[in-house]
Image: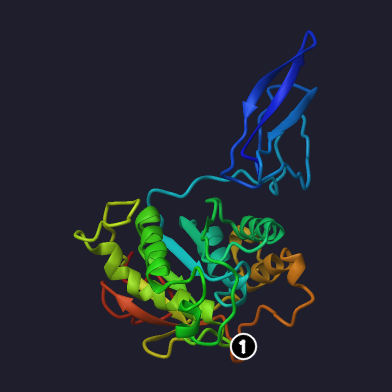
Amino acid sequence: MPETWSVETETDGEWRTLLNGSRDYMHVLLELDGQTHFRIVGDSGKESYLKINEVFVFGDGDLPDWVQRWEPTPEKADLLLLVAHPDDELLFLGGTIPYYAGEMGKAVQVAYLVPTMPYRRLELLDGLWLCGVRNYPILGHFPDQFQLTLKGMYAQKGWSRESVYRFVAETYRACRPDVVVTQDVNGEYGHGAHRAAADAAQAAIALAADENDQEKMTHSEPWQVKKLYLHLYEQNPVKMDWRKPLAAFGGQTAFDLASRAFECHISQQRTDYHVEDFGPYDNSKFGLAYSAVGEDVQKDDFFENLE
């Protein structure tokens, strides 16, 4: 992304600015007000440059559903999915996004600890949009490192325990979710970043709610998360059914949508990862790790006792 960029149009041989661009979104929809002759100009500065992946130009009429019109982080989210890497939200949290964002119409925010490479961020945007998410994801700043232990992960450069806890607490305060869903305390197949997501998700509940802890906090208003679910957590187990047809997606299931969304992660298709609601990493199995509204009884809905 360039430092600044804009769209310019030409009038009487002079170029003038029609729209100023933004660094906030990697997929941007611009209204050109009928202009058909324009140019995109980037101020690359010393360390960045303007690189365009794709450009689509539309005439009058309704835009196709696949055109992404991203919205900022909501002031009040219903559900936050906190994961380590792009595609973890599909591989390990299964049909959570299409079911709650698409079918149930919940305000769903997704946050990633590791932003990874730009092309993977483009892939994750395609996957989220397909599943019904409309709020632009929150991207962390932690480098892509691999460790098999939580202690080893927090010993990596850029991965201090305090900084991860602070980032997650800030995320809680920024979008104010009632429910948080995150990864396995054992890191699914053992990945330290997955372990860190689960660890920080738990620790940040008290940190985000502490009225006396404002140091280094950009979002100063405390927030109390109501429920936290961990993937594969054995206590207070919950079994989600991702195979039910969803009216919002023409009868496709949440599992179908998660599988299609993972296909948007083109760079990951040569790996051995698959969206699976069975086996050792069954993405339909969760456990209620924290609740301020009592234990689940039905054990099939992340919003039980909240509605």
Asked if residue 132 lies left or right of residue 212, the reply is right
Single out the residue that lies furthest toward the top: 12
Q: Which residue is mark 1?
A: 278
Q: Secondary structure at mark 1?
A: loop
- Residue 7 on image: x %, y %: 69, 28
Viewer-nearest residue: 185 or 118: 118
- Residue 207 on image: x %, y %: 29, 66
Residue at the (74%, 72%) spot, across then down: 268
- Residue 167 on image: x %, y %: 41, 62
Residue at the (66%, 78%) spot, across then down: 275
Render colour scheme: rainbow
Asked if residue 65 lies left or right of residue 187, the reply is right
- The answer to whether residue 177 is above or below residue 72 is below
- The answer to whether residue 79 is above or below residue 66 is below
Single out the residue that lies furthest toward the front: 46
Q: Is residue 295 visible?
A: yes
Asked if residue 186 lies left or right of residue 212, the reply is right
Q: Label 1 amino acid?
A: Phe
Q: Residues within 10 Å of mark 1 (few under 14, many from 20)?
A: few
Q: Please identify the quadrant where the C terminus is shown.
A: bottom left
Query: Residue 223 is drawn in which quadrant?
Result: bottom left
Residue at the (36%, 81%) spot, across then down: 289
Q: Is residue 224 visible?
A: no
The total of numbered circles placed on residues is 1
Q: Please identify the quadrant where the N terminus is shown.
A: top right
Query: Residue 166 is drawn in which quadrant?
Result: bottom left
- Residue 169 on image: x %, y %: 36, 63
